Amino acid sequence: MSNFRDPLGLVRRMLASGNRAAYSALFREGISVALKPFDVMFGALENHSLAKDMESDQPLILIVGAPRSGTTLIYQTLSAYLDVTYPSNLTALFPRAPLTAARLQKLIPTKRRPDFRNFYGQTTRMRGPNDAFHLWNRWFGDDRYQLENRLSEEDIADMRRFFAAWTSTFNKPFLNKNNRNTDCIHRLAEYLPNARFVVVRRNPVFVAQSLIQAREVVQGDKSVGWGLRSRSADETQDPLAYVDEVCRQVTAIDTDMDQQLATVDSNRVVEITYETFCEDPKWTIRKIVSAFDGLELAPSMSLEELTAFQISKKNLLTPEEQSRMLQCLNADDTAFAPSTTG
């Protein structure tokens, strides 16, 4: 099921964005049509190979957190500086044969400098890390904002077989970020014994603000839901109802994440904040590496070259939106940078 209200309008907004990651996403969407026959052919071959049971003790590093909490930037950075494999934008072009595409990825030269630009989860370059809905939808369905019911034993076995095949093929840990997986941390911990979780938190004021902006940019209408646990708002009675809905979304995700993590062995979890990561990414990466056995730094990259990321604290809301949001979140405006106007 599609979660985008106006796909053509979204294309226009992406073209007008000036964002290279948006252009890359549109390019990939275009060529995916031409590649479908190859996807079908490779998929038949891959299904045959996946029928064989494999074993692997390589960890599966799953980045989880609310949408707009900084998970994409952290995913991009970890994929560059850790010695891991990950589903890329190339593998997304072959949803029936992602493992085959991952093997082909070796033919694409690696850029010396990582590109940290993104557009609402979309990254640049064919080797760029991908959310991998093309993988997770196999078991959790096509709705990007809600999960289907608990998986069958057959689906669980298929999931385990797939990730065992992936990590056996490359003999490296698997890394992925998918915000929808935030809704099933406890299930993934049960289904995948090798799963480890990097839990990302961010000041809820900025998560909510960014979600409001995402509704406008991606959906073209702030009243239309965007992201995990989102719901559209009825503005007929209250023109700011969407602010309440976003605050409910942020609070619900955070509360549910706490409840799920309480059931998962703490040795399988590393919790970080977006703010701390941006201020000192080297320290955060070393913390993650030391927490999980089998995880190492990428030998081809120098972590010492990695510098801090800028954290935006701008207020992008109208005064009415800001007041409503702060009230809903029981917060104050001290999180925002002081205004320089006036």
Image: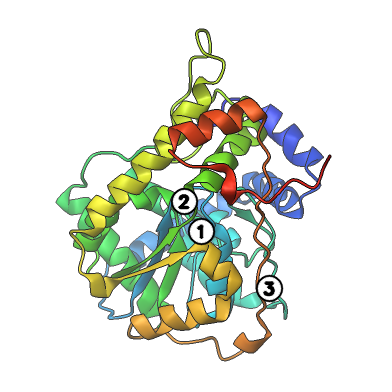
Quadrant where the C terminus sits is top right
Left or right: 201, with 236 as reference point: left
Mark pair 3, 2: CA separation: 23 Å
Identify the element where label 2 is drawn.
Answer: helix
Mark before the other along the chain sequence, 1 or 3: 1
Mark pair 1, 2: CA separation: 18 Å
Left or right: 145, with 280 as reference point: left
Where, by quadrant of the figure, is residue 320 drawn? top right
* Identity of the residue drawn at 65% across and 60% down: 311
* Identity of the residue drawn at 34% across and 63% down: 48
Q: Are marks 1 and 3 in contact (CB under 8 Å)?
A: no
* Identity of the residue drawn at 36% across and 37% down: 146
Q: Residue 339: where, in percent of width, then height? A: 74, 45
Mark before the other along the chain sequence, 1 or 2: 1
Mark pair 1, 3: CA separation: 16 Å
Residue 134's tag is 2
Name the residue carrying label 1. 71
Quadrant where the N terminus sits is top left
Between circles 1 and 2, the one closer to the viewer is 1
Identify the element where label 3 is drawn.
Answer: loop
Instruction: Determine crowd level at label 1: few under 14, some 14-19, many 20+ residues with C-alpha closer than 10 A.
Output: many
Where, by quadrant of the figure, is residue 329 drawn? top left
Instruction: Determine crowd level at label 2: few under 14, some 14-19, many 20+ residues with C-alpha closer than 10 A.
Output: some
* Identity of the residue drawn at 31% across and 46% down: 255
Q: Residue 262: where, in percent of width, then height? A: 20, 59
Asked if residue 204 is positioned above or below residue 263 in the image, the reply reads above
Seen from this angle, which residue lies furthest right?
Answer: 342
Q: Amino acid at mark 3?
A: Pro
Q: Amino acid at mark 2?
A: His
Identify the element where label 1 is drawn.
Answer: helix
Q: How is the image coloured?
A: rainbow
Name the residue carrying label 3. 114
